[in-house]
Image (cartoon, coloured by chain):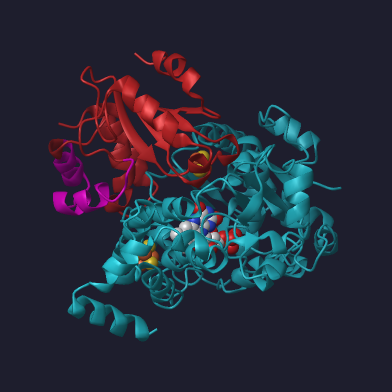
Chain colours: A cyan, B red
Amino acid sequence: MERPLTEHIRKDHRPLTLREYEQTGGYQSVRKALKEMTPASIQSVVKESNLRGRGGAGFSTGLKWSFVPMDAPKPKYLIVNADEMEPGTFKDRLLLESAPHQLIEGMIVSAFALQADTSFIFLRWAYKEAARNIRFAMQEAYDAGYLGVNILGSGFDLEMHMHTGVGRYMCGEETALLNSLEGKRATPRAKPPFPQVSGLFGKPTIVNNVETLSCIPHIINKGADWFQKLSRTSDAGTKLFGVSGKVKHPGLWELPMGITMRELLEEHAGGMQAGLKFRGALPGGASTDFLVTEHLDVKMDYASIAAAGSRLGTGTMIVLDDKTSVVGFVRNLIQFFAQESCGFCTPCREGLPWIEKILRSLEAGDGEQNDLKLLDFHTKYLGPGNTFCALAPGAMEPLQSALKYFRADFEQYIAAELQTLAQGLPAERKQRLITDISKF
Amino acid sequence: MLTLEEVHEIDEAVKVVPYKKAACIEALKIVQEHRRWISDESLKEIAAHLDMSAEELDSVATFYNMIYRKPVGRHIVLLCDSISCWVMGYENIRDAVMQRLEINYGETTRDSRFTLLPNPCLGTCDHAPALMIDHDLYRDVTIDQLDDILNRYT
Ligand SMILES: Cc1cc2nc3c(=O)[nH]c(=O)nc-3n(C[C@H](O)[C@H](O)[C@H](O)COP(=O)(O)O)c2cc1C
Ligand code: SF4
Ligand code: FES
């Protein structure tokens, strides 16, 4: 089984020096791209490879690149989104800490394909070791002439900078990231204009995930067909898959796209810890819908997981076992999203804390009969199209699927006597709730 | 007053961006690195140096949780309170840390040694529960290790 992204990562995760990296074939794709290819031919290989963005949304990388105007005057920006902060996600950390040259190589080739002259790595503050290793690798790349002016005598120039963040999940949302890089609050921007046309400082900008850009050197070296064949399904490539929660061996593995959830859980993560049963899992980070036992044979790729009602997301699975409280699990997630809401739009800013309050009161045994209806109402009210960015709809995914698959877990918290109590709500409040809810 | 060193570092950051204000987050980071936190006075000086109003800079500073607008201790303990760590029982670690340091979230020990803060996912969920102290990451943390870990910081 081929593992292009991780095969040269040492057991102890120490990154390769430039020399060592070159000995494994490193930076060959830069030579090939700059000397034998044109920006257009690179873009078409990437498009044919069927590479989809690994940051969570799974958008075709080739298609995204094609919206960048090629004749625009400089500057033009390429930005790596290394803000990894989706709870339960720990995949980019490995590539950043242990394979910095692979990322830099991918950035150079991608920047050439887009004719970008300036690139940024937007790195999460918490990744201190990654910051050290990237800084070192970047200096090596500058010294060797892979970065800077007239790279390898090709006439192509590229500057690279690293920006370490100062917190907030919203910095990972690509337009909020641009605002943050401009020294503003990390609130999202209206689209259009899309960043490809008007992004950082109003210039054409591409934002891609770390894992996405780390795939590029391999696609250039070995071709679109080879990349497609790495996968077991129609979504190309390998993928970093992770498992956390109460399994025997939590971890991270590079595996073919399209392995089943069962293989990942049982063969790689070693199955559940003794005495615990699998109840469900978020397949790709905190903002994906639960999948349950009946989905264990679903293939982990964008299309198959979507057909099962969830999203591949970041590919890092969080497992729910039968001794962990479902309501507590969802409350923890919602608490995160409520805290990280940027406050820009009302449904998200007001709705998430309200949901958190309801879940807390359920846990405390103070639930009311209307609470479940209110939760249902919020899953629609904060759903796609009703908020300015994808944070709130993302937050609703675990909630709506928990209400669907584990409804009894929520209901058990509402004791019979409390139900009677709820009947006695002031008529006016009751009426208002009913009217609001019936709108959806 | 900003020190010469601070001014020099901020001016280096300004070179990377098209206008001064765009380097304001870098500037906050630089000053915080030297002074541990951003006082009102520091805020005003940074703002003046970057040709922006203190209010505008404060709206940025208070948005980001890693910019401290209140005094903090010599070491910052960041406990992951997100989902995988919750499943793996971080709440026991939290209680044990609070008991040892005799502080709650957001507080600083009387000797200014530690400030304790909750923090979202630290990106090491296969080794939950996790915490960070300053630049150091601790994974698969157990209550037994806590004294040892905390004793490394004076
Ligand atoms: C609230 C929020 C947080 C996000 N955080 C990240 C992140 O940390 N890393 C990332 O690559 N993408 C993140 N994304 C997705 C980005 O907006 C964007 O789709 C992605 O960086 C594009 O790269 P890709 O096409 O290579 O996947 C986030 C999206 C939202 C709505
Ligand atoms: S959905 Fe939430 S995070 Fe996104 S813009 Fe609205 S308030 Fe901000
Ligand atoms: S949830 Fe704690 S490190 Fe990810």
Q: Nearer the viewer, residue B129 or B75?
A: B129
- A331, above or below A134, in the image: below
**Measured along the vertical axis of the image, is residue A67 above or below residue A292?**
below
The stretch in magenta equals B42-66
Is B108 left or right of A166, judged from the image as shown? left
Given residues B93 and A314, the one toward you in this image is B93
Quarter of the image where one finds residue A372 = bottom left
**Residue A265 visible:** yes
State left or right for residue B130 relative to residue A114: left
Q: What residue sits 51% from the left and 65% below the top?
A: A407
> What x and y, as percent, mark residue A200?
42, 61
Magenta stretch: dominant secondary structure: helix
Evaluate whether residue A4 shows in this view.
no
Q: Is residue A277 above or below residue A382?
A: above
- Image quadrant occupied by the C terminus of chain A: bottom left
- Report the number of numbered marks: 0
Q: For this view, does A301 lie left or right of residue B122?
A: right
Magenta stretch contains residue A293: no
Q: Residue at x 24, y 27 (%)?
A: B108
Whether residue B116 sits left or right of residue A109 in the image: it is left
Residue at position x 73%, y 52% from top?
A: A217
Of residues B130 and A85, the one nearer the viewer is B130
Residue A416 screen position, x and y as percent: 37, 63
Q: Does the magenta-highlighted stretch encompass residue B63?
A: yes
Q: Position of residue A187 (x, y in %)?
A: 35, 62
Residue at 43 percent across and 72 percent down: it is: A376
